Amino acid sequence: MKFLRQSTASQVRTIGPFVDDTDGKTAETGLTIAATDIKLMINGAASVNKNSGGGTHRVNGHYSVTFNATDTATVGEMTVSVVVAGALPYWDKFFVLEESVFDSMFGASAAGPLTSLGANAPANWLNAAGIAAGALDGKGDWATAGDAMTLTSGERSTLAAAIESAMINEGDATALLQAIADKIADANIDFGDLTAAGIASAVWANQTRTLTANPGLDAAGIRSALGMTAANLDTKIAEILAEFGNIEGGGSGSIDPSDLADALLPLLITALRPFVIDANLPQVSDAGTFALTARDDYADNEDIQPIGPIRIQTPLALLRESNPPRLRFGATQRIGSRLGDVKFIGSAFAVAVDGEDDLYDVFIEIPKSELNRAPGAYSWDVEAVFPAGFVSTLFGGLLTLNASMGDNEERDPLNPE
C-alpha cells in the first residue's frame, strides 16, 4: 500500500517494473515516459494527465516520478496508469491522506496513528489537556478514598464490613431462604388467596362440582357399559366406587358409565384375554394348530371352509345386545416362498353356551377363494373388533397350508387314498 500527502509538492515515488511487450519479462530500461503518458484517476473519476514531469529510469525497469500539489489535491484513492511503446501497460495504486494523518504516520518523530496527538489533535479532539479543571464536578461521584488507591484504616474497615454484610453463605439454607423472603417482602407483592389453604380450598371446590351425586355410577351400570357379564366383577367395581365416594366426601361420583367404559376398555380387553377350553378342528393336534389344503380349481361345490367350534372362556360380552363386537379371522405366512407377504382372511361368529355367562363356541368361515395361496406355515388369530375401535385378540395359533391337488377331487392331505 502506497501513500501520498494531500496538496504537497515534490513527492517522489517509484513505479514499475516495465517489461518488454514481446516476451513479457525483459526489463525496459530506456523508455521515454512523459507526463502525458501518466494518467491519474482520483476516486474512480475520469482520468487526467499527471500535472508535470515524466519518469526517470532507476534500475531494472523501475522509474521514479514526482507528484506535486496539483496531483495530490484530493484525498482518497489514486490509480496511476502508464502506457508507452515497447512495454506492457502498467498500473499502480496510491492513497492520498490528509496532512495530519500522513504526518502522524510518516513525519519526523511521528507519534504513530494510535498514540495521543497532543497539541496536534484536531479541533474538538478529547484529550486530557482538553478537560478543564473542575469540568466534571457535579457530574458523578468522583471522590476517591485516601491518597490515589490507598485506603485509610477506617476506610478499609468500613469497606470490609459492607462487603461482609452483603454476602450470603450459599451453604446456609436458612440464610438463603430468608434472603429470598426479604426480597419478596421488599417487592410488596399482593398474593391475595394464593396460600396453601387458598389453593386447597379452590381444588376442593372444583372437584366437588365434578363429583356430585349421580345414581348412574353403580357396579351394574359400569359392568353393562363395558359389556361384562361376570357377576363376580361387582365386588371390585364396588371398591372402585367406594374410592370415588371417599374422594368426594361420601357421595357417589357423577361420572357417566359409558365414559368410564371407553377409558377402561383398552386395559380390560388386554388384561381379560380369553383362553381356549376345547377345539374341534380338521387334523387337530392341539387347540391352536391345524392343516388346510390350498385351493386351485379342483372339484368342490362348497364355497366356505368351516372350522370349529372352538370353545373359549372370556368375561367380554361377545353377544351383548348393544353394539356387540365383530369377529374376524386372519392368517399371515411365516414359513414359505413369500415370507410375510401372503395373507388370507375370513370371518367368525360366536354362539353362547347354554347356562354359562362366559363360555362361547366360536366358528370360523374361510371363503375357499382365499385359500388359493402359496403353501407354507401361517400364523392365524381371531380378533374382536369393538365399536369404539379397540381390537382384542381372542385366540390364535399356527396352521399348515398344504399344496393344491390340482383338478383332483379334494382329499385329506394326511390320509390320501
Image (cartoon, rainbow, N blue to C red):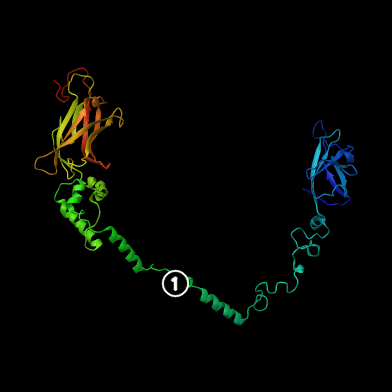
Query: How far from the left and from the top, in percent, is residue 351?
Result: 14, 37
Residue at image location 24% in from the left, 47% down from the top: 265
Is residue 48 in sight in this rendering? yes
Question: Quarter of the image holding residue 102?
Answer: bottom right
Nearer-the-camera pick, 395 or 414: 395
Query: How far from the left and from the top, in percent, is residue 340?
Result: 30, 32
Nearer-the-camera pick, 246 or 216: 216
Question: Quarter of the image holding residue 200?
Answer: bottom left
Nearer-the-camera pick, 336 or 306: 306
Is residue 284 in sight in this rendering? no
Q: What element carries label 1?
A: helix
Query: How far from the left and from the top, in percent, is residue 388?
Result: 27, 43
Q: Is residue 83 left or right of residue 179?
A: right
> Which residue extends farthest bottom?
154
Identity, as a three-letter code, of the amino acid under mark 1: Ala
Q: Mark 1 highlights which residue?
A: 181
Query: Which quadrant would the C terminus be assigned to in this image?
Result: top left
